[in-house]
Image (cartoon, helix red, strand yellow):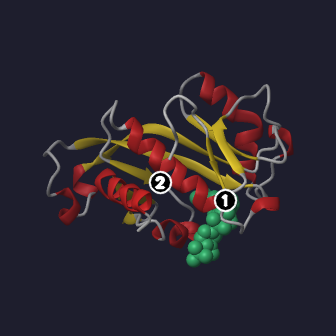
Amino acid sequence: MPTEGSETSDVLQFRIEPLDASRHRREAFDCGVESLTTFLRERARKEVASKTCACFVAVPAAEPGCVAGYYTLSAATIALEQVPPELARRLPRYPLLPATLLGRLACDLRFKGVGLGRLLVVDALARAFLASGEVGSVAVVTDPKEATVSFYEKFGFRRLRADRMLLMMATIRDLLTGAAKGD
Ligand SMILES: CC(C)(COP(=O)(O)OP(=O)(O)OC[C@H]1O[C@@H](n2cnc3c(N)ncnc32)[C@H](O)[C@@H]1OP(=O)(O)O)[C@@H](O)C(=O)NCCC(=O)NCCS
């Protein structure tokens, strides 16, 4: 879980830290999906500067400056009518509810399949949960490509409609509490 103050976490052999264009070599990043590669290389710095998103990168402990993977978080809204009834039971009846968008997630081709994607998702969920203590957010939502729907299902994300998935903040709290207890 990201720690208040340090804004970094050391898990496996990676540190996860806010994107810093002066230190992180974005031009060398290649995840094999052009839009996600180009975003990090050409747009992430500007979108962070304009507060459109926050961007966090995984840096291998052995290669400072190398970007092994990244994710972005932004404020979002979800329509109450899209939340499955059993999940909506404890929510107020506002037509729109605050949420956190996990907008982009990608691992460099060199670092695929070693658990980095999982590490980034867990870090993103923990960060979103901590932030919801300061600015309300009832869920993390993401809009995955069809090929990665089953990846997100591993974390408990539920499909809302064809292109959107959701994980309630209450479920994230339980996941993080369970992880902290070693369950
Ligand atoms: C999708 C992606 C982030 C996964 O990262 P990764 O580091 O390769 O995944 P991990 O090694 O952490 O795998 C964690 C688990 O997810 C599974 N997994 C990995 N990629 C998957 C996929 N595309 N679909 C379904 N399951 C997947 C792994 O088999 C593993 O399962 P296990 O826990 O049962 O062993 C990565 O492949 C990537 O960057 N892809 C290109 C960009 C992209 O498609 N991003 C998603 C945007 S919607």
Residue corresponding to mark 2 = 142
Q: Is mark 1 within 8 Å of ligand 1?
A: yes
- Determine the residue positioned at 43% across, 58% down: 164
- Mark 2 lies on a secondary structure that is strand
Q: Nearer the viewer, residue 15 or 43?
A: 15
In the image, residue 131 above or below residue 63: above
In the drawing, does residue 64 fall left or right of residue 131? right
Residue placed at 82% from the left, 40% from the top?
64
The amino acid sitting under disc 1 is Leu
Q: Position of residue 161 (x, y in %)?
A: 38, 63
Quadrant containing the C terminus in the rendered view: bottom left
Specify few, some or many for label 1: CA neighbours under 10 Å numbering under 14, 14-19, or 20 or more.
many
Q: Quadrant of ligand 1?
A: bottom right
Amino acid type, callout 2: Thr
For disc 2, the neighbor class at 10 Å (few under 14, some 14 to 19, many from 20) is: many
Q: Which residue is mark 1?
A: 116
Residue 73, percent from left and from top: 51, 40
